[in-house]
Image: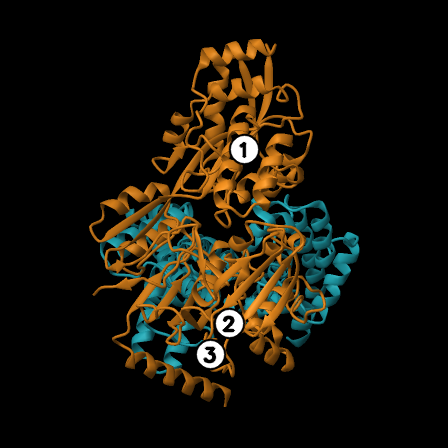
Chain colours: A orange, B cyan
Amino acid sequence: MKLMKTLLAATAMMALAAGAAQAKQLVFCSEASPAHFDPGPTTGGNDFDASAHTMYDGLAAFVPGSTDVEPGLAESWEVSEDGLEITFKLRSGVKFHTQPYFTPTRDFNADDVIFSFERQYKEDNPYFAYLANLTWDYYQGMDMPRYVKEIVKVDDLTVKFVLSEPNAPMIANLAMPFGSIVSKEYADQLAAAGTPELLSTQPIGTGPFKFVDYQLDSVIRYAANDEYWGERPKIDDLIFAITPDQSVRAQKLIAGECDIIPYPAPADVEMLQANENITVLEQEGLNIGYMSYNVTEPPFDNVKVRKALSMAIDKQAIVDAVYQGAGQVAKNLIPPTMWSYNDAIEDDTYDVEGAKALLAEAGVTELTTDLWAMPVSRPYNPNAQRVAEMIQADWAAIGVTANIVTYEWTEYRERGKAEDRKGPFQIGWTGDNGDPDNFFATLFSCSAIGVSNYSSWCNEEFEDLIQKAKVTSDPEERTALYEKAQEIFKAEEPALTLAHSKVFVPMNKRVTGFVQSPLGDHVFDNVDVTE
Amino acid sequence: MISFILRKLLLIVPTVIGISICAFAFVRLLPGDPILAMAGEHGVTPERYEVLKEAFGYNLPIWQQYLNYLGSVLTGDFGVSLGTKRPVLNEFLVLFPATVELALFAIILATAVGVPAGVLAAVKRGSWLDQATMGVALTGYSMPIFWWGLLLIMFFSSYLGWTPVSGRIALSFFLRPITGFMTIDSLLYGNWPAFVSALRHLILPTVVLATIPLAVIARQTRSAMLEVLGEDYVRTARAKGLTPKRVINVHALRNALIPVITTIGLQIGALMAGAILTETIFSWPGIGKWMIESILKRDYPVVQSGLLLIALIIMAVNLIVDVLYAVINPRIRVR
């Protein structure tokens, strides 16, 4: 009987598919399976593409192709004089998806907003632990518990966030995937039916696409949301074909089995660019590959030693050899695409003799040190081992002996954080929300020591600037503060900034309207295909 | 026969306990830690680390963690993935048919080509045919699977366009799984083009996965055949004036097949291992890809239960092979 039902349902669905033969379809060959479809707790870029960017909206959103923030489900917002209250005016008439498993009886309102956030920190919320082993990593990671005191419903279409201290990056945080709004009405129905876990597998959002089906580790299907509050997507069917191997993704694009692929192998880029049916988009990534000096360990506690070691490294040669045209030398911690980038900063010039002299001035004659190389390839540093070898050779020229060390990836980071770590440590970062705070404070604030500040660097002046920038809401004032912070960073050299890598998105020439996001998102709202 | 099967079944109990200990210990002996693996470059504060450790139950003494694990496994609860938050058993049951489907096609191909090739090489021992067959088998046995798969994709899929690059079925077919076997499901739906598409998608992964077992089976068949061909009863059969065809197919092959069947049984275990690479190349949604991703993420529940479930399946297959063996060769039963 069950078999019979399934067969009937499937036949009906095939008939539907046949009827929609003229439908415009786009295939995105994604790199990994999403954990699930609840945008609140998930943390991977592949999770964001599969849920937050396709099926959900947040109060605010990133302008396509930029890290600027624009209104989303909130039409507008107002920050109080003291910076402690943000009041959001919500969009009216926004409909949650209608699905065979849920029919909304009301439009989106303040209750949905409050529910979407409260479930992430109120332990008595029925959805706080609705899945086993559930953790709200981004809510925690972006330090939300520290800033959000409460969220108050003013009326059905007005919500007020009450903060315990001012926080300028808050709006950008709310545009991030974990700020996606889920339907409280749907969640209540599921909870009443005793099946809250379905919230993560049968998603209901307000976004441009509706969920159709997911075959584990294989294919995700979406359909355009005809009732979308914004402009309806130009394609009708969106398909994610999960293809973990990067070379195979490139072959699928060539064979016409995919329309767009993320993260091609750098070695394949040239071949793809040469293909007449393929366009390759490229953009500087919102990332930085760097090498942290441990400023608490002698002789690296001496800024002259740090400067000398950085001057002895031929960064351009490393970028040419290791990034293979997919990188650019970094003089600042933040990439040039980010606001407040200080272009007036002068990078240390590659100068072997100068480095030798500076080292002698610091009184260092014989130096033998560990040099840490990550065991994995990351977008910001595709081959840390090779980088280490090149630095080793550069340092040999000034009489410094480096022993390359590496560990398993989690072990590597764990040992790297230790305050008594010996030797410079290669690592990197990819931005979350496009706010400079997400680089400066996350990587080099005093409170990040032992977490993600691998230099154990706590500089009073720098700290003062970035904390002030965090609580100031005027963008111009913030820019000035961060520009000054970059000067101190360069003068103190807690880390060698090595490179920003480029991100490529190869796609079939029939695809139009795809805009590359500096945040690494793949968004299909405005994408179209020509036959 | 029943007591033979019962004896074999009893032996499984200590083996399962042993394997559960190994699987449990294996993932914990790997350097790395699931909480840090999840945190990535963001890192995690020491306080938050303790909170998560407690939430996942990793703060308990290791023996207690194991006993809790064993206890829940005995009640059929194989734990919940740290990544997807789904029960491990559910994921396994969804993904396993894909692996079995591919493994079955591979073992059929390996046997259908490997056995005749081995027989031929044995009968024409020392000829160029023998040399060529064994040379190819040796190459197949030493083939780096990842490279081999990509090479086939580039030639047959991208260059010639004969086969699809990867996946289980063309995306235009949207069949909800019934059995999880794409070939069977497409037939159940009566969708002939879908069936053809599923078969086309099976060609390259089957060839890649079958490469090593095929080589092993061909070599094993050849040496077993050579041994049997030297036996007295084969000489007698020849002396009786039977045709060479009948001597080889009936008298020799039947006896030579006993060790070959054992080899095929053992190769099924090897196929599970080979599936890891093959499934990754061909985006095949099976347990090989699932396991390797879980190991990289240090997803303890998936790795330990996944290993245990795979071991259970292999033990079941071995039991079946043993029984088959006993059917073919009655001497084994009495031992």
Q: CA distance from mark 2 to mark 1?
A: 43 Å
The percent position of residue A526, horizontal first and vertical second, equals 33, 62
Give the camera-side residue of B33 and B283.
Answer: B33
> Mark 2, chain letter?
A
Work out whether disc 2 and disc 3 sit on a shared chain.
no
Give the camera-side residue of B296 and B97.
Answer: B296
Q: Secondary structure at mark 2?
A: loop
> Mark 1, chain letter?
A
Q: CA distance from mark 3 to mark 1?
A: 60 Å
Identify the residue shown where x is 24% and y is 56%.
A509
Identify the residue shown where x is 71% and y is 56%.
B21
Residue B178 numbered mark, or none: 3
The percent position of residue A7, horizontal first and vertical second, equals 42, 85
Q: Mark 3 packing: few (<14 Cα in 10 Å), some, or many (20+)?
A: some
The percent position of residue A183, horizontal first and vertical second, equals 54, 73
Q: Is residue A296 left or right of residue A476?
A: right
Residue linked to disc 2: A203
Q: Amino acid at mark 1?
A: Ala
Q: CA distance from mark 2 to mark 3?
A: 23 Å
Query: With respect to residue B187, does B4 lie above or below?
Result: above
Q: Secondary structure at mark 1?
A: helix
Q: Earlier in the sequence, mark 2 or mark 1?
A: 2
Residue B230 numbered mark, or none: none
Work out whether disc 2 and disc 1 sit on a shared chain.
yes
Residue A485 numbered mark, or none: 1
The percent position of residue B163, horizontal first and vertical second, equals 28, 61
Identify the residue shown where x is 49% and y is 59%.
A47
Q: Amino acid at mark 2?
A: Pro
2 or 3: mark nearer the eye: 2
**Toward which corner of the image does residue B173 lie, by quadrant?**
bottom left
Q: What residue occupies the far front of the structure in this picture?
A: A81
Q: Secondary structure at mark 3?
A: loop
